[in-house]
Image: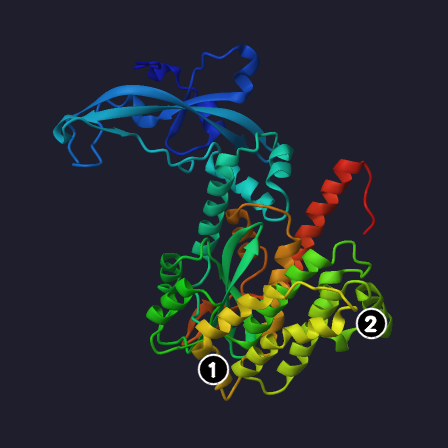
Amino acid sequence: MGKRLFQEVYVSQSRTDELGLPGLVVVSEADDRDTVDFTYHAVHKSYFDKDKMKCPFCGGTNTAETKIRPRKFKDILTSEEKKGKVIDLVFHQRFFRCDDCKGKIFREDIDFAEEGCRYTNRLSDLLAEGTLTRTYERVCKEYGVPASKASVGVIMRRRLRMRRGQMPPLKTPDSLIIFVAYYFSDAYPIVLGIYGREVRLIDVLSGSDEATYAVFFQELDRDEVKRVYIDPDEQLNMAAAAAFPDAEIMLSEECVQRYARDAFKEIIHKDGSRCSIPHRYHTLTIAESYLSEFEHKRVISGLRRRSRLRASYNAYQDLLVRMEKKWDVDMIRGWIDGLPDYLDEAKSDGEELKALTEFDLLRDVLDIYESQIQAYLNLKKKPPAAMASAVLAVLDALDEMPYCIYDVLHARMLLNVEHDKRIVGGKTYRIGVPVDRLTRKMNEISGQIKKKKEEEEYGYEPED
């Protein structure tokens, strides 16, 4: 079973000092001489003790060693003279049986690496720090280690946990904005907070189920949250209502317009392929009044032979104009009912156009969440104008971010920009990341990753 592979006389003090991991000692290895400099075999100091190992379940010492399993990790040695040497650390982990616990098996702890990670903590911290602004694969390549897909989530969660542990506690905002962003088909709720008239990122949640929302809401002071602006999601609605019974739960104007915009984007995707309008999604979904005369002419020209797209564009722009004034749910319902009129105006003689059913989801939102929309309309003091621009900026930045798993995205959004702080009653709190600084950094990271990828694929440096 591999018992007693080493004796205490095999301990190398110089290599133990070089390894520098508390509690571990390096022992003579059985590797080929060519690999000695890069392979360190280690055991716990207690390996050579005669005392019985204490059982973690009952605390007794009626235990016996059953087997030893070598566990292989990548590690890095650093010194003032050397940049860092990546090594293979082979840890000989012991397993024990407790006879007082009916033969329960336990193993000795590994405190120098996270469970499920193939890297030691000090190497994983370096990899995680690099992955905040570059691709995980590139960072691993620079260190000369395999890009373990099984480890990337572990190392990023560790980095986030460590950094958060160094931050002051979160100050609960006056109002919450929670919207669901779709990133490569996965749904991630984004949580923004309104502090006075400023909008800041608080967190990015891993899922959009009621339990995930409830766990996050427990971190906040329920008495301080006065308003919660939600997306039309029943799980979110129930979780917010349960967590903040005295707060107003609302669907904002921004949310209604976003759902209309998303429906229109779906039409652009279907009917606007090979459209001659530059940046068509952006150009067609912003208010027409923001277009230059040249851009307006390009839009008219690009839509001339696309009757259904032209009809939906005219309808969508009309909705934006109507919502600039005082609006209500019935007005939007009337607009939806009038969508066939826009098709009739746009089609040529004898032309049949498919109904604009993409906007049906907006009708469902109005029917199911009318009371939450009405609560927003009844507000005497509306949220800051920065709220709508903040949501759009985050969504646009996510659209540009190359693919990564949630844990990488989560860390990039929360750790790359300094959290602002506020002193309340002599105590320091963090109040999240300003959205403008956040999105600038996200776009910068996306640009760096895309530039490097283009450089590698085509063998030249792309133009800035």
Circle 2 residues within 10 Å: few <14, some 14–19, many ≥20: some
Q: Disc 2 designates what residue?
A: 296
User: Where does residue 57 sit, x and y in percent of width and height?
Assistant: 19, 37
Would you place residue 365 above or below residue 277 in this image? below
Query: Percent from the top left, x then y, of residue 338?
Result: 63, 77
In the displayed structure, 267 sits above or below 372; it is: above
Toward the viewer: 379 or 433? 379
**Which residue is rendered at x = 24% and y = 25% of the image?**
96
Regarding residue 31, the answer to whether it shows in the image is yes
The three-letter code of the residue at mark 1 reads Gln
The part of the image, by quadrant, that contains residue 114 is: top left
Secondary structure, mark 1, is: helix
Instruction: Tell me the quarter of the picture where residue 281 sits.
Output: bottom right
Q: Is residue 82 above or below residue 154?
A: above
Q: Which residue is denoted by mark 1 in the rendering? A: 374
Q: Are marks 1 and 2 in contact (CB under 8 Å)?
A: no
Q: Is residue 322 left or right of residue 221?
A: right
Between 196 and 341, which is closer to the camera in this rendering? 341
Q: Quadrant of residue 10?
A: top left
The type of residue carrying mark 2 is His
Tell which circle, 1 or 2, labels the residue nearer the N-terminal end.
2
Callout 2 secondary element: helix
Q: Position of residue 225 (x, y in %)?
A: 41, 75
Which residue is at the front of the view, 438 or 277?
277
Residue at left offset 72%, top offset 70%: 311
Residue 6 locus on image (x, y percent): 35, 15
Near mark 1 (Cα within 10 A), the count class, few <14, some 14-19 or many ≥20, is: some
* Residue lying at 45% horizontally and 54% vertically, measured from the top left: 207
Observer able to see residue 174 = no
Q: Residue at x 45, y 77 (%)?
A: 372
